[in-house]
Amino acid sequence: MSSERWNAERYQAGHSYVWRYGEALIDLLEPCAGERIVDLGCGSGQLTALIAERGAGVIGIDSSSEMIAAARANFPAIEFRVADATSFAIEDSVDAVFSNAALHWVRDAASAIACVHRALRPGGRFVFEMGGSGNTGELIKNIREVAGEIDMPWFFPSIGQYAALLEASGFEVLQAQLFDRPTLFEGEHGLEDWLIMWGDFLFGKRSEPEKAEIRREVAGRMRRSSYRGGGWIVDYRRLRMAAVTR
């Protein structure tokens, strides 16, 4: 979870696929009534609320104050906190930590995993999905060809890389899957909208005219291969894992 400023309004309006794809992950989590669960990288709180609907007591954590403000406005009955994945602390041990589409923002993965382990009770479970090895590979390739050097904000690990980090922190990995999940960016300008949403992270302090030109050129290069039926299909790959504390 980056500490850069996020546009929570744009995220909710145009990027709902982030949490909609994550709904299936809640079935893997299997939250139960009476459990205490942390949603790490909760964003604007939609999946946090679905976990709460299962009867669990849930705390949503995100490093973005803008996202937490949106989550509190959306779901005022749920507790949300501004905290970083690499340094958060929970007063009493929880039964599970859940995370969807957030951990690839955390380049210091070892510190985040250690925080998760400290937050969990013995036998507690850690269920998450994140961008995996090769995620948006074609898109990033085109961005680099257009923009040159970029500020790559993400860590897209293989199963082996992340499993080793989990085991080093005292987790036992129960399930691991790396899979293709082609993702639709809706609309004529869907790819450029994605680049607007994440462009500040990728392009740093370049001027807005420079960013706009990069967006147009990248979309032009990818139109033939990626534009289908009024939307853009982009090469997402996801890493989904479940682990327990030993």
Image (tube, grey):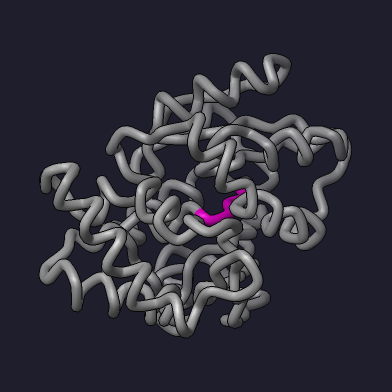
**Residue at left 19%, top 54%?**
203
* Stretch of the chain drawn in magenta: 97-101
Q: Give the main secondary structure of the magenta stretch.
A: strand
**Residue 228, quarter of picture:** bottom right
Residue 62 visible at all: yes
Residue 95, quarter of the rendered image = top right
Locate residue 97 relative to residue 140 in the image: left or right.
right
**In this orientation, does residue 164 appear?**
no
Number of disc labels: 0
Q: Residue at x 67, y 48 (%)?
A: 96
Q: Nearer the viewer, residue 245 or 87?
A: 87
Quadrant position of residue 17: bottom right
| Residue located 51% across and 73% down the image | 234
Q: Confirm whether the magenta stretch covers residue 149.
A: no
Image position of 57 (left or right of 146): right
**Foreground of the two, 111 or 73:** 73
Point out the image quarter for the C terminus.
Answer: bottom right
183 up-or-down from 202: above or below: below
What residue appears at the point 44 percent right and 81 percent down from the top-left corner?
Answer: 158
Q: Position of residue 217 (x, y in %)?
A: 27, 67
